[in-house]
């Protein structure tokens, strides 16, 4: 049986991405897996791991209309999370939270075009 080890996020500037994912989303730099200048491992409480991998070109995802991987972050207060992220310069895809059968969500892009969602479950 396969088990997810981590999620890889391709970025064009590794140092800027480290700053963005640590200061904006609260990840920490892992001392266990650090491979500059090509890749770096980040970790979040609960041992959620992201591998930032340096590539040459940013992506232009037509969210939500194209096949893609989306990392979904959960929160108990979506409005508060949106306000806090907006204050840090994060731009959301939708002006307001969107309802779906399990709760409400919104989506945002990182500086490299990768789309993530934040969700508040019912």
Image: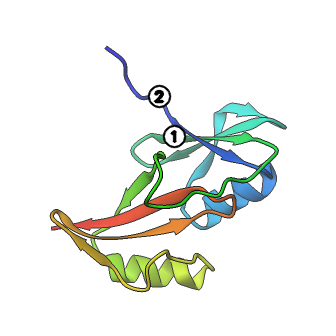
Tell me the number on the disc at residue 49: 1
Residue beneath disc 2 = 5
Residue visible at 33% across and 79% down in the picture = 97
Q: The N terminus is located in which quarter?
A: top left
Farthest residue in the top direction?
1
Residue 89: percent from left, percent from top: 63, 80
Q: Position of residue 10 (x, y in %)?
A: 67, 44
Residue 114 relative to residue 65: left or right: right
Image mark for residue 76 = none
Cα distance, mark 2 to mark 1? Answer: 7 Å
Q: Nearer the viewer, residue 105 or 64?
A: 64
Q: Secondary structure at mark 2?
A: loop
Q: Are marks 2 and 1 in contact (CB under 8 Å)?
A: yes
Quadrant location of the C terminus?
Answer: bottom left
Residue 49 drawn above or below residue 14:
above
The residue depicted at 50 percent of the width and 34 percent of the height is 6
Q: Earlier in the sequence, mark 2 or mark 1?
A: 2
The reply, left or right, for residue 112 in relation to residue 65 is: right
**In the picture shown, does residue 32 fall above or below 23?**
above
């Amino acid at each position: 049986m396969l088990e997810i080890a981590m999620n890889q996020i391709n970025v064009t500037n590794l140092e800027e991405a480290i700053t963005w994912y640590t200061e904006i989303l609260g990840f920490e730099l892992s001392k266990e897996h650090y491979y500059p200048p090509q890749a770096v491992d980040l970790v979040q409480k609960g041992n959620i791991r992201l591998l930032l991998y340096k590539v040459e070109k940013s992506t232009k995802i037509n969210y939500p209309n194209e096949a893609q991987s989306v990392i979904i972050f959960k929160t108990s207060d979506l409005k508060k999370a949106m306000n806090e992220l907006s204050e840090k310069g994060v731009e959301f895809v939708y002006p307001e939270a969107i309802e779906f059968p399990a709760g409400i969500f919104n989506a945002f892009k990182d500086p490299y075009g990768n789309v993530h969602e934040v969700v508040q479950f019912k």
